[in-house]
Image (cartoon, rainbow, N blue to C red):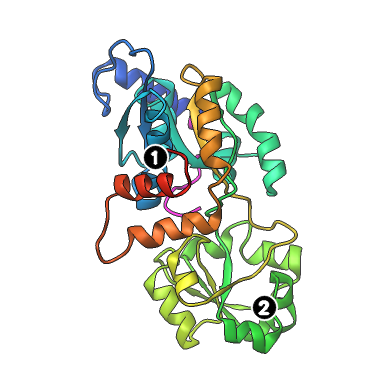
Amino acid sequence: MKRITKVGAGLLTLALAMSLAACNGNNPFGENGPKELGSLKIGSQGFAESDILAQIYGQMLAAHGYKVSYVTGIGSRETFIPALQDGSIDMIPDYAGNLLYGADPKATATSAADVMAALPAALDPLDLTTSSAAQAQDSDALVVTKQFATDNNLVSIADLAPIASTITIGANTEFETRSYGRSGLESVYGVKDWKFKAIDDYGGPGTLSDLLNGTIQVADIYTTTPSIKQNDLVVLQDPLHLIAAQNVIPLFSKSSYTVNIANLCDRVSNVLTTEELMSLNEISAGASKPSAESVAKDWLKKMGLV
């Protein structure tokens, strides 16, 4: 998953350390006084999509009587997991696959159903829980131009196997060693002997430029990146679930979770699709550079949620 690294086996130790630091007055989130009934602190991870998601869920809750405040730019799970545990925040939008791997480094689930089935047991020892996952996913995807797909009859990743020795895949440096990189592509889909070009921009402008000019033939671009739609790119299907499902999912501390809060979040998640999330990112990146607050507000109204 982009921007946020997986948390290793030391998560529980790190959480305890940060909780102790908070007790010693070094809490970056400030002092935590008595929690006001009906108040919620919603976090975001520090990139535009996370800010928008925090605002969408937060504004939905605020519209139904909750007093909502936001803690933005928190960063990775190494920071926001302890923040949930010590009450610095109450909820943060996350991504299901990487949340599972962060909570349980030994997890192997990749399909959306398997990831969701595994999450409760992985989160329980951390005193965390979730509401329902959204339809929307923001995950790594192997992407080609429409012309290249047409010329080579490409629909799924498996279709790359016959031409693999002739292609170059462009992605961040770590792609080759990831479970869905060189070893995974060969073992799951028989895609081997391809060349690799490291482009460390998380599927950004450099990756897109190389894909469009033919320097690379396949790119690792995240599914909600506006350039996919803007350039009519083709996302290759992954029927064998090589790449773990990364459904958007609200993550809560158990102490903050209630059935009513979950139901309100579920109303958002039920209509939040990958296409809608891609559109939200496109609006956010537009020339007028609207705030995450205004993007979320307009979307909630459009969907009839507030």
Which residue is labeled 2 in the image? 193
Residue 185 on image: x %, y % = 68, 66
Residue 137 on image: x %, y % = 56, 52
**Magenta span:** 1-11
Total marks drawn?
A: 2
Q: Secondary structure at mark 1?
A: helix
Quadrant in which residue 194 is drawn = bottom right
Determine whether label 1 and label 2 are within 8 Å by CB: no
Mark 1 or mark 2: whose residue is earlier in sequence: 1
On the rendered image, what quadrant is the C terminus found in?
top left
- Measured along the vertical axis of the image, is residue 128 above or below residue 53? above
Q: Does the magenta run of residues contain 35? A: no
Asked whether, in this view, residue 55 is left or right of residue 183, the answer is left
Point 41% across, 49% down: residue: 299
Asked whether, in this view, residue 102 is left or right of residue 64, the answer is right
Residue farthest to the front, as pictured: 304
Residue 127 visible in the displayed image: no
Q: Nearer the viewer, residue 34 or 142?
A: 34
Point 58% across, 22% down: residue: 125
- Measured along the vertical axis of the image, is residue 259 above or below residue 232? above
Check disc 1 and give the amino acid type. Ala
Residue 136's disc is none
Q: Viewer-nearest of labels 1 and 2?
A: 1
Point 51% across, 33% down: residue: 265
**Is the residue marked by circle 2 packed among few (<14), some (14-19), or many (20+) residues within 10 Å?**
some
Residue 183 on image: x %, y % = 67, 63
Point 65% across, 39% down: residue: 106
Residue 90 on image: x %, y % = 41, 25
Which residue is labeled 1 in the image? 54
